[in-house]
Image (cartoon, grey):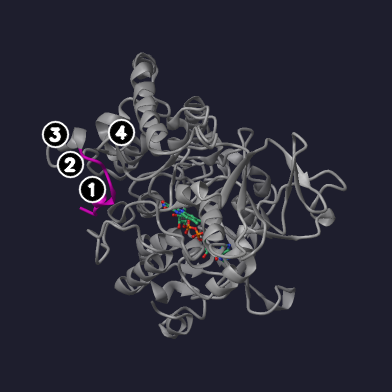
Amino acid sequence: MASEQQQQARCTRTVVPPSSRVAIIGGGISGLAAAKQLAAHDPVVFEATPSVGGVWKHCVYRSTRLQTPRPDYEFSDYSWRNRDDPTFPTHAEIVDYLQGYADRFDLWRYIMFGAKVVGVKFLGGAAAGFTELWSGTGEPLQGRPMWEIGVATGGPAGDDNVQWYKFEFVVMCTGKYGDVPRMPVFPQGKGLDVFKGQVMHSLDYCKLSEEETVELMKGKKVVVVGYKKSAIDLALECAQANQGEGGEACTMLVRTLHWVVPSYSIWGLPFFLFYSTRLAQFLYERPNQGMLRSMLCRLMTPLRSGVSKFIESYLAWKLPLDKYGLRPDHPFVEDYASCQMAILPDGFFDMADQDMIRFKRASGWCFSENGVVLDDGTEVQADLVFLATGFEGKDKLRAVLPDPFRGLVQDNSGMMPLYRGTIHPLIPNMAFVGFVESVSNLHTSELRCRWLAGLLGGRFALPSVEAMVRHVQGETAAMQRTTRFYRRHCISTYSIHDSDAMCADLGSRVHRKPNWLAELFAPYNNQDYKEE
Ligand SMILES: Cc1cc2nc3c(=O)[nH]c(=O)nc-3n(C[C@H](O)[C@H](O)[C@H](O)COP(=O)(O)OP(=O)(O)OC[C@H]3O[C@@H](n4cnc5c(N)ncnc54)[C@H](O)[C@@H]3O)c2cc1C
């Protein structure tokens, strides 16, 4: 893997050329895909840190691996060297792969490292009504600057260090995760201040070396708050650090249970059969699907819940969920449809069987002097409390967007209203990539960037602002009917249909398999969307 110095030594951007019309904010997977797809516009990528990779560089533990199989987390025009390797890549392998992608397409020349965007001003005029914001035509590039971007390069982001640059179009790729921790709020006298031990968000844990993490946790009573993938990985690392003499158990504080999966095989059948083929996705609701399909979809309810129950029966048989009180009440499909299905790291329940990982259910909790107190009054003693409570990705957008756009980042549903998962109908000349999730976020981001390139290249025009708003509302309603966790903005149960819509906009083939058998039964992934 190239070091940060080696990356810097590559021919990266140091000045913003006056000809540049497109800015990309962020150099993670979404920013890299955007740079590649929008190369014709000589974009400038502003990346706050000294390296590419985003969360894979800055928001991982020692044990973090991709939980998507390699061939599903792959750019359509750049394969993994070892794509047939069945192991899940480590975070270091992913950064290496992304650097290879940047090398292959010489993306370094677009990227300005250590360039943190600290503010964005709208130049489109305050008088414009929202319906005219996209110039009424849906055509974004009209030859006049629409946004001014303030960039801090090195040193504190005081006014002196901020340079302002004008662009016609801005692509926000600042990421949903990392950077801004989500912190629980407590009533007075029950928060962090009363606790005598140490409290750390998982984001800060990511900054420690392997030796430091072991040193931090060994021989300590640790509580991990959360039960998503990061919390599970963290609890396992904690249990491993506490093996042997003087070791202490780690307690996971679980509010909402989620289904966990040991591997991509269910009763001997490959997992993709259940959700990733066109036939499988035919069972699920699509946004704005029309009355006839809605009726058909209602008739297919028993089939959908049958699939979910089949998977649940396997998980309850394979894993000691009942033994530890970890069987969720909600159907599996609701976790799948909200991209919350965690792949279990090896040895997790072995550690639980050795009493090195314990579980406590609590719908509410607070701090006490010596640990945490659950809503039933039980006190769990702790020296160290980890908050694996997630991130506030939208705050990164709110921090830079001006009013009134800042207030539009989230609508009444709590989601970001994005047409084709990319365009906010009321924020002109701006796109958002990486805010909609699927089983492979890389695929979702890359296809959106291709679609965006088509939009900026004039291959199609956006519908009216009203039509986009209606479309987004239809999508939100469909998600709300599919999963109670809809706010995560996940398209996994209708990802093929979602890709179809983008291909249709681009004038590309919608059915991309070689024959109808494959069309129905083979999984769709990024290789199906190679440029024609
Ligand atoms: C621990 C973990 C495991 C995951 N596992 C999977 C998985 O198995 N499969 C999957 O599909 N997805 C997974 N994800 C989701 C993952 O976030 C996406 O797959 C993808 O990497 C997101 O890329 P991104 O470019 O959209 O965002 P990020 O990776 O967050 O990149 C955003 C970039 O923007 C930069 N930035 C932010 N603000 C500014 C600013 N103001 N100015 C300049 N630069 C800025 C950041 O420094 C960062 O480099 C995982 C995420 C995490 C955290």
List the residue tagged with mark 3.
Answer: 517
Q: Quadrant of residue 409?
A: top right
Q: Earlier in the sequence, mark 4 or mark 3?
A: 4
Task: Tell me the CA gap for discs 1 and 3.
Answer: 15 Å
Disc marking residue 274:
4
Q: Is residue 38 left or right of residue 469?
A: left
List the residue tagged with mark 1.
Answer: 528
Circle nearer the viewer, 4 or 3: 4
Q: Earlier in the sequence, mark 2 or mark 4?
A: 4
Q: Secondary structure at mark 2?
A: loop
Which sits in the foreground, 59 or 158? 59
- The answer to whether residue 174 is seen in the rendering is no
- The kind of residue tagged 3 is Leu
Q: Residue sitting at 60 percent across and 64 percent down?
A: 205
List the residue tagged with mark 2.
Answer: 513
Q: Earlier in the sequence, mark 2 or mark 1?
A: 2
Disc marking residue 216:
none
Mark 4 Cα-neighbour bin, 10 Å: few <14, some 14–19, many ≥20: some
* Residue 460 picture location, percent across and down: 35, 45
Q: Quadrant of residue 518?
A: top left
Vertical comparison of 375 with 443: above or below: above
Q: Is residue 458 left or right of residue 177?
A: left
Mark 3 Cα-neighbour bin, 10 Å: few <14, some 14–19, many ≥20: few
Q: Is residue 524 magenta?
A: yes
| Numbered range of the magenta stretch | 522-532
Q: Are marks 2 and 1 in contact (CB under 8 Å)?
A: yes
